[in-house]
Every structure is written in structure tokens, then in C-alpha cells.
Amino acid sequence: MTSPESPRKPIMVGNWKMNMNHLEAIAYVQKLAFGVSDKDLDRTEVAVLPPFTDLRSVQTLKEADKLKILFGAQDVSAHKDGPYTGEISASMLAKLKVDMVLVGHSERRAYHHEDDDLINAKIGEILKNSLRPLLAVGETLPIRQAGDAMSHVIAQLSGCLKGVSTKQTDGLIVAYEPVWAIGTGEVASPEDAQQMCLAIREWLSSRFSSTVAEQTRVLYGGSVKASNVKELMNQPDVDGALVGGACLDPAEFLRIIRWPDQL
């Protein structure tokens, strides 16, 4: 759990994946904004990652109602522009004023065969357009069972952040998502989450600086819900959560956001 002295404000990020059209997105954000209080937002930042087709609607609603809820994209192209049918560039996202861009999610790695080099190129485009990368890393069950989880995650970090300067880490968020816990109902123990989040922070310190390590928020993701979020957040190096299925219900997501109030 982020201490009062820490520069890291907790953040809860809801990844909608391929759910909700733009009208549903508007209704969802309105409901979430109505439910979340200034007290909630003073303690914890809140972000949603809608599908590309919803981003403009969410942006318009956020600006019109001056909402403090953040929003971002679920992916981005590794290309600046050009003949890449179906791709969305970082410059397009920058025009929509997104607050962050998710890259490296295990579903992109598994279903679209994205490797660390491609993710690294995407991060390059994100940074060139002054956007904030939200980098997801994590191991599969066979890798964990073989005892190679930590080395695997560190290798992902090294590959995905290759060539990134210390200055460019400002605003970086890293999300640790064990692949075996995504959408399965399984969840890493709080101790497992803490061990990996600490290892990520130690790597950030050795690769960049102790200041970067102290300022970078490291999130846990993988079957996070209201019933388990507080024990995860009580770990000293877990600064928030990347929430999947549970965030699709705004009432459940609100309970996750209010994790400090849980008994």
C-alpha cells in the first residue's frame, strides 16, 4: 500500500476490453462519475480504458462535465502513420487527449503474437507524442511452475523499455498481470503480488534510478474484485490495480475504488 509519505498516489484502471458501444460508454461514465466522490478521487485516481470507438464520446463527456476521471486507450500502432489498415496511431490518440495508453497486455501478446520488440516500438510512439505508457507484463502458468516467473517479467521489462531514457519514465505505469490469473477467477496471493511488484521496482531502480523506482506506480492485475482488492492494496509495493471483468459493473468498480473503506 502506498504510504502517506510516498509520491505514488494509488490508481485503479478499468480495462473494458471489447465491451460497450459509445452510447453504453457514455451511460457508464456518467454513472461512475455520479457515484465517485471528491474524497474518493483525493485518495485514489480512477481511469477507464474504453474501446477505440468510445474514446471520442468519453472525451466529449469528460470535457463537457469537467470530470476528474481519467481515460485511455487499450492499444496503439507501432507506426507513425501510413498504409496500415485498422491501426490507430499515437498522434490520433494525442488529439483525443487520452491520459494513458495500455501496451503489452497478455491478450495482445497471445492473440496477436506481439513480442517485446513490437511493444518497445509502440512505447516509442507513445513517448514521441507525449503520452503516458501503461506497460503490462506477466508470466504464464508453465513459466511460474518452472520457477522462472521473475526472470521472465524482468526480461519483458528490459525488452519493452529498451532505449527509454530516465527522463522519459515520467508518468510511466507498470502493471503486473500473471497471465494465469486473468479472467480465470484465480488470483495471485498478496505475497506473490508484492514479491513481483517489489522486483519490478528494484529493476526500475537499477535500470533508471532510485527516484524513478520510488515515483513509478506498479499495479497488480488478474481477477481483481472488491472482495480481494484491499488485501492486495495493503502490500507496500502495490500501487493500484488494472481491473478487467469486475470493472464492467460500475457499482463493483466503485467498490474497488473505495478499497480504503473496506473492513
Image (cartoon, rainbow, N blue to C red):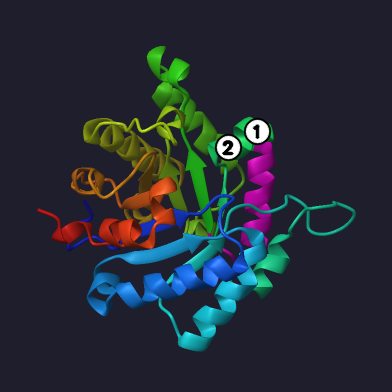
Q: Nearer the viewer, residue 200 or 229?
A: 229
- Of 143 and 39, the residue lying toward us: 39
Q: Residue at x 58, y 64 (%)?
A: 131
247 in relation to 149, above or below: below
The residue drawn where x is 72% and y is 52% is 77
Left or right: where does residue 230 sit relative to residue 242? left
Residue at the far right: name it.
83
As drawn, the label of residue 107 is 2
Q: Secondary structure at mark 1?
A: helix
Q: Is residue 92 left or right of residue 151?
A: right
Please indicate whether residue 140 sits to the left or right of residue 217 in the image.
right
| Magenta segment includes 130 | yes
- Residues at discs 1 and 2 in contact (Cβ within 8 Å): yes
Q: Per the image, is 71 magenta?
A: no
Give the image location of residue 19, x and y in percent.
Answer: 56, 53
Q: Residue at x 23, y 36 (%)?
A: 190
**Which kind of residue does numbered mark 1 sit on?**
Tyr
Q: Which residues are magenta?
A: 117-132
Badge number at residue 111: 1
Q: Where, by quadrant of the figure, is residue 35 drawn?
A: bottom left
